[in-house]
Amino acid sequence: MKTYNKIFNAFNKLIQTKSFDDITVLEICQKANVSTSSFYRHYKDKYDVMNENYKRILDQYINSKQNHNYEDVFINLFTMSKELHYLKNAFDYTGINSLGDFIYQYSYNTVIEMCKTKNIHFEDKDLLLLDVFCGGASIMYQHYILGKYDLSPKQAGHLLYQMFPENFKISW
């Protein structure tokens, strides 16, 4: 776990000052003071390290006793994005393995898992709605971080929650 965190922390220091495309695995290893073989024992690639950031943040908010529903989580994600300026650099890369793509996939899977733990069943039409929501929400989140919307975190989180499919709100 120590090496895992050293790599994670080294990446986070680099992404604060460099674009994602300019960061290499070798550079992460040098900053973390670990070998490349150690890196690959813990992470698949630099995308995996970048995506671990969002995973940790979302998991923390979902598991927090301070959040009582998805709206609280959305508001916290928007608030956090204002504090973590490096997220702009993380969104430099788009496409397969991008942070936006990971946010979509991880968010979708997280909601599905929460439904399963509460024994909530859904139909294909519900999955379609969730699919569209998560895809759109990940793009909206990226645009918010890049400054496209002049909304407070509370406004953005509330609007996103209003768009969240009703059938999944009960999974909280």
Image: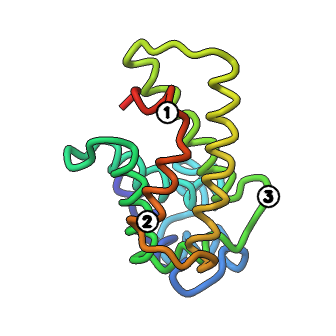
What is the three-letter code of the residue carrying label 1? Val
The residue carrying mark 2 is: 155
**Nearer to me, 102 or 14:** 102
Q: Pinpoint residue 100: horizontal percent, then vertical percent.
A: 66, 57
From the viewer's perspective, tell me whether residue 12 is left or right of residue 104: left
Q: Nearer the viewer, mark 1 or mark 3?
A: 1
Disc number placed over residue 95 in the picture, else none: 3
**Residue at (45, 70) in percent of width and height:** 81
- Looking at the image, is 168 positioned above or below residue 63? above
**Nearer to me, 36 or 136:** 136
How much space separates mark 1 and mark 2, taking CA atoms? Answer: 22 Å
What is the three-letter code of the residue carrying label 3? Gly
How much space separates mark 2 and mark 3, taking CA atoms? Answer: 28 Å
The first of marks 1 and 2 along the sequence is: 1
Q: Nearer the viewer, mark 1 or mark 2?
A: 2
Q: Pinpoint residue 113: horizontal percent, then vertical percent.
A: 47, 26
Does residue 7 show up? no
- Looking at the image, is 35 positioned above or below residue 70? below
**Residue at (36, 60) in percent of width and height:** 76
Q: Residue furthest left?
A: 65
From the viewer's perspective, tell me whether residue 89 is left or right of residue 132: left
Q: Pinpoint residue 33: horizontal percent, then vertical percent.
A: 46, 72
**Would you call the spot at circle 1 few (<14 residues within 10 Å), some (14-19), or many (20 or more)?**
some
Q: Quadrant of residue 129?
A: top right
The first of marks 2 and 3 along the sequence is: 3
Q: Residue furthest bottom?
A: 17
Q: Secondary structure at mark 2?
A: helix
What is the three-letter code of the residue carrying label 2? Gln
**Nearer to me, 19 or 143:** 143
The residue carrying mark 1 is: 111
